[in-house]
Image (cartoon, rainbow, N blue to C red):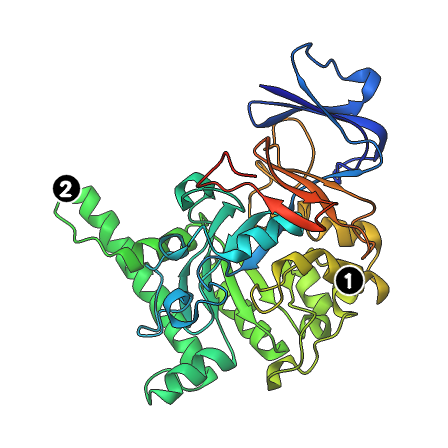
């Protein structure tokens, strides 16, 4: 089934805007983007009149806890941290996601169609992250890629969690040691596995070391929760010691060493921004920080760290960052193409261009204007959300009862 979204102000993000453009979708994939006269629309295509709207790719939240930190469910819906083992590399966020979490409906209302769901920061090594769409009946239906990266944490959180248990790690020294020990063991495991393969001898597999070997081999990046500049420096030190790809997550004091991050080409997923300074390591939290990083040449993505900041406020963080010095083009890229590229999802999402998933959002105006709203959302070419003007509320199509609107 073909769908032609026509007449809107099309913002591909990874290309120049097109006034009165057309986005053609077939079987859930974008097949053409261009001026109306340049796109051959099949006679049997469903026409969506987007006149008066801005047409953009769905936003990408590159660090959230939707579905594993369910809203309003308390203990029963809290599956974000398995704080019983400092090394949780074998744990998968995928296995804890509830697709019926209210956060996914909020995501659609905010134009967010892809979320990288991550374990929390209670452990030095939290587990495997997963990229999912914001709509679906089961997490398997929503899946974009698994795993996407491995989540790790430095700083206050893991030392507090295990310090309260009176066990390692209770200091920054101990947190770094847990990570270093885990990678050293994974190196030994890889060597033993290779020897067993050469000698054709039995080998006992270990799920924890298996995933860390993928990090060592460059198959998966390392998403490092780190706020303070000294913790970011430790993250860099560890990554260079073991040779893995580092992505700084949060990076509250990243602007203090922005030149170093730029020189080493380390991306930063920065945020959340619309929060109070709840602990010592976020004292430098400021709306101006994304702009400082970007001007230094650091590739940035913005994050709400949902539910710390509601996921539908992702675009508002971009707006506030622009107010404090971030240029508008980078702001828009920081919630679309940048997070998609940083998390190696840019072959699927993050822009409007042929070959990518048809995750498309129609906005009432410029999304960086706080008065604009998402009026219609398509995920994989399917219309799953619209704003009901008469009722003054958003309406999400239920993936469980898909005939209900």
Seen at 64% across and 79% down, the residue is 282
Image quadrant holding the C terminus, namely: top right
Seen at 75% across and 69% down, the residue is 289
Seen at 41% across and 57% down, the residue is 93
Left/right placement of residue 269 relative to residue 133 reads right
Q: Is residue 301 visible?
A: no
Query: Residue 17 placed where, x, y %?
Result: 83, 35
Q: Secondary structure at mark 1?
A: loop
* Pointer 2 or 1: first along the chain: 2
Query: Residue 122 placed where, x, y %?
Result: 43, 74
For residue 182, which quarter of the picture? bottom left
Residue at the left extreme of this rendering:
202
Image quadrant holding the N terminus, namely: top right
Neighbour class for label 2 at 10 Å: few (<14), some, many (≥20)?
Answer: few
Residue at the top extreme of this rendering:
43
Neighbour class for label 1 at 10 Å: few (<14), some, many (≥20)?
Answer: some
Q: Secondary structure at mark 2?
A: loop
Location of residue 354 with respect to 313 vertically, above or below:
above
The residue identified by callout 2 is 200
Q: CA distance from mark 2 to mark 1?
A: 51 Å
Query: Residue 44 placed where, x, y %?
Result: 65, 11
For residue 247, which quarter of the picture? bottom right
**Disc number at residue 296?**
1
Left/right placement of residue 60 relative to residue 15 reads left
Left/right placement of residue 123 relative to residue 200 reads right
Which is nearer the eye, 196 or 207? 207
Which is nearer the eye, 333 or 223? 333
């Amino acid at each position: 089934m073909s769908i032609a979204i026509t007449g809107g102000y099309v913002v591909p993000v990874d290309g120049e805007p097109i006034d009165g453009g057309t986005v053609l979708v077939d079987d859930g994939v974008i097949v053409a983007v261009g001026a109306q006269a340049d796109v051959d629309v099949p006679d049997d295509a469903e026409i969506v009149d987007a006149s008066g709207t801005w047409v953009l790719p769905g936003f990408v939240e590159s660090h959230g806890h939707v579905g594993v930190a369910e809203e309003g469910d308390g203990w029963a819906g809290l599956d974000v941290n398995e704080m019983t083992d400092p090394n949780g590399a074998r744990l998968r966020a995928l296995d804890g996601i509830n697709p019926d979490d209210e956060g996914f409906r909020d995501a659609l209302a905010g134009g967010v169609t892809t979320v990288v769901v991550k374990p929390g920061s209670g452990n030095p090594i939290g587990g495997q992250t997963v990229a999912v769409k914001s709509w679906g009946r089961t997490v398997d239906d929503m899946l974009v890629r698994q795993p996407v990266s491995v989540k790790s944490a430095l700083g206050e959180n893991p030392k507090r969690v295990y310090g309260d248990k009176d066990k390692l790690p209770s200091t920054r020294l101990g947190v770094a040691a847990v990570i270093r020990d885990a990678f050293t063991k994974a190196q030994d495991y890889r060597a033993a596995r290779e020897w067993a393969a050469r000698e054709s001898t039995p080998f006992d597999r270990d799920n924890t070391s298996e995933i860390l070997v993928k990090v060592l081999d460059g198959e998966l990046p390392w998403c490092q929760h780190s706020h303070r500049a000294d913790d970011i420096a430790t993250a860099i030190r560890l990554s260079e010691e073991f040779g893995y790809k580092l992505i700084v997550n949060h990076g509250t004091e990243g602007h203090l060493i922005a030149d170093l991050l730029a020189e080493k080409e380390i991306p930063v997923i920065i945020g959340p921004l619309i929060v109070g300074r709840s602990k010592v390591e976020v004292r430098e939290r400021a709306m101006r920080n994304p702009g400082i990083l970007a001007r230094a040449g650091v590739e940035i993505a913005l994050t709400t760290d949902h539910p710390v900041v509601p996921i539908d406020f992702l675009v508002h963080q971009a707006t506030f960052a622009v107010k404090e010095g971030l240029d508008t083009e980078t702001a828009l890229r920081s919630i679309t193409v940048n997070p998609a590229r940083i998390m190696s999802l840019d072959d699927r999402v993050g822009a409007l261009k042929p070959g990518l998933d048809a995750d498309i959002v129609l906005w009432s105006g410029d999304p960086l204007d706080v008065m604009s709203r998402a009026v219609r959302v398509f995920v994989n070419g399917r219309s799953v959300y619209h704003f009901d003007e008469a009722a003054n509320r958003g309406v999400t199509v239920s993936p469980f009862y898909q005939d209900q609107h």
